[in-house]
Image: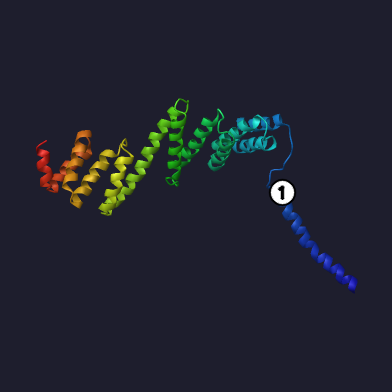
Amino acid sequence: MRHSWKTQRRWKALPYLTITIMYLSGCGDSERIYEQKPLTTLYKKAMEEFKKEDFKEASSNFDEVERQYPYSSWAPHSQLMSAYSAFKAQQFPKAIATLETFLALHPASPSAVYAHYLRSLCYYTDMLSPERDSENSVLALQGFQEICQRFPYSDYARDAEIKIDFIQEHLASKEMLIIRAYMKRREFISAFQRLSLFVKDYPKSVLIPEALYRLIECHVVLGFPGLTYKTFVLLRHNFPKEIWTSMAESLLVSKKSLSVVRKLSKL
């Protein structure tokens, strides 16, 4: 009877042991198996995946080159190729992390400017996603500005300047949407504060005429005739043919801002 109890206990334990073995086997399948290979074999495989446009797999294989041969002359280039492959696969966080590691290890490398550029390009491309907030836009802007400051004569500086202009207009557009919402809710003090910053932060924006007009609206409502006059003169001098200038003139007449109208008639 005692022998039967022990046997029964052993057989009850076997299902748990079987489950554990199956679980551990399943974990191993989802991980990349480490296999030591010659450097050239690893790099060649990564390049083959890259040429087939399997960028996700190519990035992982370039990582393997750097992991198995971290002190070889191929390692820095493999890091850059891994980052670029991840960028092409739209794995932006992975690409950025790889580039930051490269810059930390090789800050004086001739390829450092490319690493800075590609990192900024990751933020720039990712910022265009509709669900993204302004954080990536700001990081892209800062990255491209750094390239223009540190590498002004590089091949990447000119493209960085173009992208800076686009990012600033992108940020200006988002800010104007917020300002319009304040105006619609008649929160003129908040709108006035944001508009004052807008004209300072985005002086080259195509939205400046609208910003000046909306400042005039705020000045009229808040009772600032002196600022109303100065802002309108600025608007009419710089944008005489803009629709916003005509709208500002009509606004001042309709609101009977007599002191402002009298000053304007003397110009």
As drawn, 204 above or below 4: above
* Amino acid type of the residue tagged 1 in the rendering: Gly
Quarter of the image where one finds residue 149: top left
Look at 64% across and 35% down and name the residue there: 62
Look at 87% across and 67% down and name the residue there: 7
- Total marks placed: 1
If the image is split into quadrants, where does the N terminus sit?
A: bottom right
Q: Give the x, y percent position of residue 119.
A: 51, 37
As drawn, 9 above or below 101: below
Is residue 56 among what the camera can see?
A: yes
Q: Is residue 225 left or right of residue 41?
A: left
Mark 1 Cα within 10 Å, few/some/many (few <14, many 20+)? few
Is residue 239 among what the camera can see?
A: no
Q: Nearer the viewer, residue 243 or 161?
A: 161
Disc 1 on helix, strand or loop? helix
Look at 27% across and 51% down and name the residue there: 183
Quarter of the image where one finds residue 248: top left
Q: Looking at the image, which residue sits at the far front?
A: 108
Q: Give the x, y percent position of residue 139.
A: 45, 41
Q: Give the x, y percent position of residue 4.
A: 88, 71
Residue designated by label 1: 28
As drawn, 199 above or below 152: below
Q: Is residue 244 left or right of residue 162?
A: left
Q: Give the x, y percent position of residue 26.
A: 71, 51
If the image is split into quadrants, where does the C terminus sit?
A: top left
Q: Nearer the viewer, residue 73 or 2?
A: 73
